[in-house]
């Protein structure tokens, strides 16, 4: 009798283990599907990371061109720089995209698997596969651009003078720190010290 009970318990335990393994495999499959559906977001992230140093460089280059490059050479110089930036983006973006996809598997994937139940993962997959959501996401760039244009048009006249004042103040600070090199002139001479007061006249000696 005990032998039969032991055999039955082992059978039940084995069945439960197989069920657990199957559920675990199902969750991993759902997580993988979610990561695949979010690939467009990873691509956007990769592009944004690649663009950051390029934007900073271009911003600095514009200042140098305005100050040091003759006007008749600026257009040709700008085209050369644009070509170099394009080559950088074409080389850097695939690297970042590949690393982002790899890191998503080892970081985001386990977090999703831990924090969502299998039923929640199924609901999430259904949401991400929804044609309505896909349409909304595809229109987000258009919505964002439209909003950005309105914000710039409305707030630009108020913000632009403040930005110009900031630029002027920073330029003045840098010009003073470089001894007038930024403006191409000599720094303003220090104010001459006020003349010392004349000594008080001595009283005439009495005869």
Image (cartoon, rainbow, N blue to C red):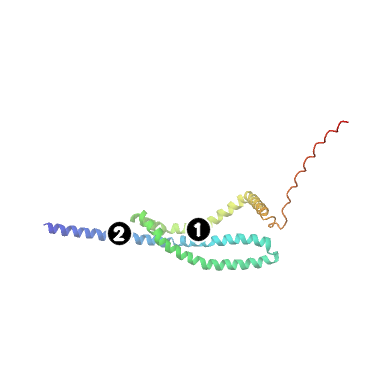
Q: Is residue 75 left or right of residue 2?
A: right
Mark 2 crowd level (few <14, some 14–19, many ≥20, 10 Å Cα): few
- Crowding near the residue tagged with mark 1, few <14, some 14–19, many ≥20 C-alpha atoms within 10 Å: few
Residue at 38 percent of width and 56 percent of height: 111
- x, y percent for residue 60: 61, 60
Residue lying furthest right in this view? 207
**Dot label at residue 139:** 1
Q: Nearer the viewer, mark 2 or mark 1?
A: 2
Left of 111 or right of it: where is 97?
Answer: right
Whichever of labels 2 and 1 marks the residue nearer the N terminus, that label is 2
User: Does residue 89 sit above or below 195 in this rendering?
Assistant: below
Q: Decide: is 75 above or below 160.
A: below
Q: In the current view of this chain or complex, which residue is farthest to the front?
A: 207
Q: Write down the quadrant of residue 203 in the picture.
A: top right
Towards the viewer: 135 or 207: 207
Residue plotted at (56% across, 62% down): 54
Farthest-out residue, left: 1
Residue 188 screen position, x and y as percent:
73, 52
In the image, residue 90 above or below residue 155: below
Where residue 78 appears, as percent x and y from the top left, is 63, 65
| Image quadrant where residue 207 sits | top right
Q: Is residue 186 above or below residue 91?
A: above
The CA span between labels 2 and 1 is 36 Å
Q: Nearer the viewer, residue 71 or 132?
A: 71
Residue occupying the point 45% across, 62% down = 100
Residue with the mark numbered 2: 23
Q: Are marks 2 and 1 in contact (CB under 8 Å)?
A: no
Numbered label attached to residue 168: none
Q: How many marks?
A: 2
Left or right of 150 in this view: 20: left
Q: Quadrant of the N terminus?
A: bottom left
Q: Secondary structure at mark 1?
A: helix
């Amino acid at each position: 009798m005990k032998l039969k009970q032991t055999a039955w318990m082992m059978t039940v335990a084995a069945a439960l283990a197989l069920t657990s393994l199957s559920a675990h495999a199902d969750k991993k499959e759902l997580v993988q599907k979610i990561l695949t559906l979010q690939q467009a977001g990873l691509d956007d992230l990769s592009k944004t990371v690649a663009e950051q140093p390029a934007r900073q460089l271009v911003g600095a280059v514009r200042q140098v061109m305005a100050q040091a490059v003759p006007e008749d050479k600026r257009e040709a110089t700008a085209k050369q720089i644009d070509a170099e930036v394009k080559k950088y983006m074409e080389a850097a973006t695939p690297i970042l995209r590949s690393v982002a996809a790899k890191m998503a598997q080892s970081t985001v994937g386990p977090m999703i698997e831990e924090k969502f139940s299998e039923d929640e993962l199924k609901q999430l997959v259904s949401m991400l596969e929804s044609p309505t959501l896909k349409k909304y996401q595809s229109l987000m760039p258009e919505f964002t651009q439209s909003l950005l244009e309105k914000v710039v048009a409305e707030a630009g006249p108020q913000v632009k003078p403040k930005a110009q004042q900031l630029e002027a103040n920073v330029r003045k600070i840098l010009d003073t720190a470089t001894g007038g090199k930024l403006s191409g002139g000599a720094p303003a001479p220090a104010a001459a010290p006020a003349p010392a007061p004349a000594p008080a006249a001595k009283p005439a000696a009495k005869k």
